[in-house]
Image: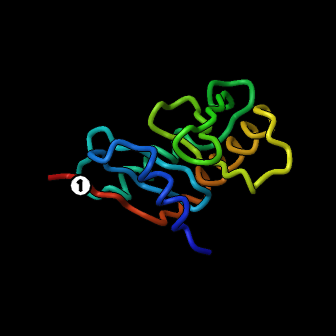
Amino acid sequence: MTHTPAIETWRTLLDPAKSWVLFGHDTCVILVRPDGDLADQATTLLREYGPVHPGTPAGDFDTIELRDAPGWVVTGHHPDILTYVAPDELDDHDHLVVGLHGRSKRDQDGHDLAVVHVEDKRA
């Protein structure tokens, strides 16, 4: 499975000066203070803030329709953890359906913790 479309989408959406890490189900962890091994730093954040626990802030999400790329970004309870949902992933593009799907992808990434790309923008 190639992650090139998701990588290119995140490059379009994010500040080009930011370092970030992409996980296997299109969850992106933006590293505000990148330090050391970026994959390890992002994995630590996603391990804590990725898994969904309904009825808690870890189950909350919001859906943002994108203007600069097709699809949506689904946010969660950590402002630097975002999940991309492409239009072809779902037949129903209702914001609730998209949000639940994105939250599920974040949950999968929070358990699998499979890094597929590191974008290191440190000087």
Q: Is residue 73 left or right of residue 98?
A: left
What percent of the width, then of the height, locates residue 121?
A: 25, 53
Per the image, label 1 sits on a secondary structure element best described as: loop
Q: Amino acid at mark 1?
A: Gly
- Most foreground residue, 10 or 50: 10
**Which residue is drawn at the image coordinates 43% and 64% (left, top)?**
117
Q: How is the image coloured?
A: rainbow
Q: Residue at x 68, y 44 (%)?
A: 102
| Residue at the limit of the structure toward the bottom, as seen here | 1
Q: Residue at x 80, y 41 (%)?
A: 93
Q: Position of residue 16 (x, y in %)?
A: 31, 47
Find residue 66 and report its horizontal and vertical position in percent. Answer: 58, 38
Which residue in the protein does label 1 denote? 36
Q: Residues within 10 Å of mark 1 (few under 14, many from 20)?
A: few
- Position of the N terminus, as image quadrant, is bottom right
Q: Position of residue 84 (x, y in %)?
A: 60, 48
**Residue nearest the observer in this picture, 39 or 96:** 96
Tell me: 116 left or right of 98: left
Residue reaching furthest to the left:
123
- Indicate whether 34 appears above or below 5: above
Count of numbered badges drawn on the protein: 1
Above or below for 29 versus 40? above
